[in-house]
Amino acid sequence: MLHQVHIYTDGAAKGNPGNGGYGVVMELVGTKYRKEFYEGFRLTTNNRMELLAVIVGLEKITKHNTTVLVVSDSKYVVDSVEKKWVFGWEKTGFKGKKNPDLWLRFLKIYRNHQVNFKWIKGHNNHPQNERCDELAVYASALPNLSIDAFYEKEAKKLL
């Protein structure tokens, strides 16, 4: 039997770039199983956190070929996958594209499952999306934030 998992995600950044975080709510359909995950970073962008939330959710799934619905308020993430842009970027080695490290990480885990995306409007009283936003904002304000090493290295090149 294939499991069906719903992953709700959100990312936040105070300043863009600035300190940021992601929030993930995962639910195993037809059960009471629900998990939440979050992490904050000292210097990152909103789009990186939106994408990282999806990646972390997918990486938490231990059974291959799981049917997954990712629900996100990020047009950046949803459109990049649903409109198949990311697959074109992959063919060109992500030349001129932002966040190649995360997109490569995404594609590796994405291909292990049957993943569909659904875009929802953010801050629109969707309970799981609101919870993800709370987690992302909370994570971005934690002490001892993690380092988004790839982003910080790229940011230094621009200075």
Image (spheres, helix red, strand yellow):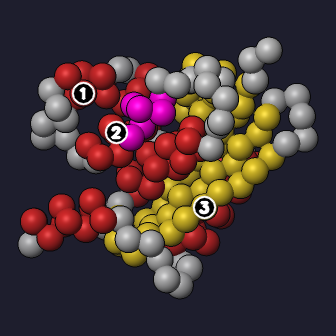
Q: The disc labelled 3 sits on which kind of residue?
A: Tyr
Q: The disc labelled 2 sits on which kind of residue?
A: Trp
Magenta stretch, residue numbers: 105-110
**Secondary element at image label 1:** helix
Q: Which mark is residue 103?
A: 2
- Residue shown at 62% from the left, 44% from the top: 60
Q: Which mark is residue 38?
A: 3
Q: Is residue 64 left or right of residue 94?
A: right
Q: Is residue 25 left or right of residue 141?
A: right
Image location of residue 159, percent across then percent down: 9, 72
**Secondary element at image label 2:** helix
Asked if residue 125 can be seen in this view, the reply is: no
Check whether the beta carbons of the residues at disc 2 and disc 1 lie within 8 A of each other.
yes
Q: Which residue is mark 1?
A: 90
Q: CA distance from mark 3 to mark 2?
A: 19 Å
Q: How crowded is the residue under tag 1: few (<14 C-alpha within 10 Å), some, or many (20+)?
A: some
Image location of residue 156, percent across then percent down: 14, 70
Q: Please tell me which of labels 3 and 1 falls first in the chain.
A: 3
- Residue shown at 50% from the left, 69% from the top: 40
